[in-house]
Image (cartoon, grey):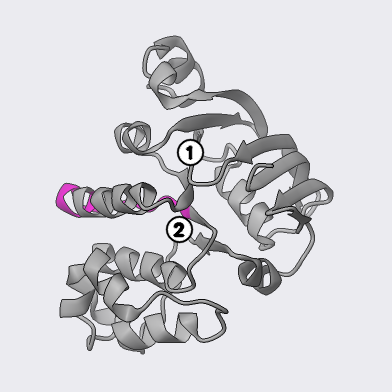
Amino acid sequence: MSLLEVNGLNSYYGDSHILFDVSMRVERNEVVALLGRNGAGKSTTLKSLMGVVTPRAGSVIFDGTDVAGRKSHKIAQAGMQLVHEERRIFGSLSVEENIVLAGLTASKRWPLNRIYEMFPRLKERRNNRGNELSGGEQQMLAIARALIRDPKIILLDEPFEGLAPVIVKDLMKACRDLAAAGQTIVLVEQNLAATLALAQRIYIINNGHIVHEGPARELKAQPDILQRYLGV
């Protein structure tokens, strides 16, 4: 059984139908990316998996249990973590306080040293408040807050957006290291080159519908699909 199996997911914002029968799967220890233009439904898909948006129909089978419709904190306790696009760190708390606080309710936690080995910059800044960090450092902290809970799967929503190339390079290395260690990742990202370098399989969503699924290496050789759905 796949770690995550999504079948016939339909989600709405008010009366607006956003996701139409979205189905996808993620195997254990796999990196899967969800691509699409702005407004295609990528972030809504992640939020629907995490319970931030409650689907009106469909199933989200996570590690053998249907979590569709459950509260976000229950889904988090089951082992799923979403790193929101807006990061959602506590600006008034120190880096270390942010990380420790995130791990308090986890049944199993990473040791702090493991976090700092992955993000040495956070170790240097561990006594700084969240609002004193650069955008890239805040993104590292947001990911660290998810990892401290030792998740079975981590959902990354636009982790490289608006960051300097050198920071993207550091975050790419961290994601590669995570994948090499067996971390299951679902990635939503506009940076196509970074996405194709990280992911093993790709889903493309267009106007709330999944329109393509296949290995990342094959998508590189299909410029017609890239142009049609991503405009590149």
How far across and how far down the image is residue 56, in percent?
83, 51
How far across and how far down the image is residue 136, in percent?
25, 62
At 48% from the left and 81% from the top, the residue drawn is: 103
- The residue singled out by tag 1 in the image is 33
At 78% from the left and 52% from the top, the residue drawn is: 55
At 61% from the left and 69% from the top, the residue drawn is: 76
* Measured Cα–Cα span from mark 2 to mark 1: 15 Å
At 42% from the left and 73% from the top, the residue drawn is: 148
**Number of disc labels:** 2
Q: Is residue 169 above or below residue 154?
A: above
Q: Is residue 95 above or below residue 3?
A: below
Amino acid type, residue under disc 1 in the picture: Ala
Image quadrant occupied by the C terminus: top left
Q: Which corner quadrant of the image does residue 20 belong to?
A: top right
Image quadrant occupied by the N terminus: top right
- The residue singled out by tag 2 in the image is 85
Q: The magenta stretch spans which residues?
A: 156-168
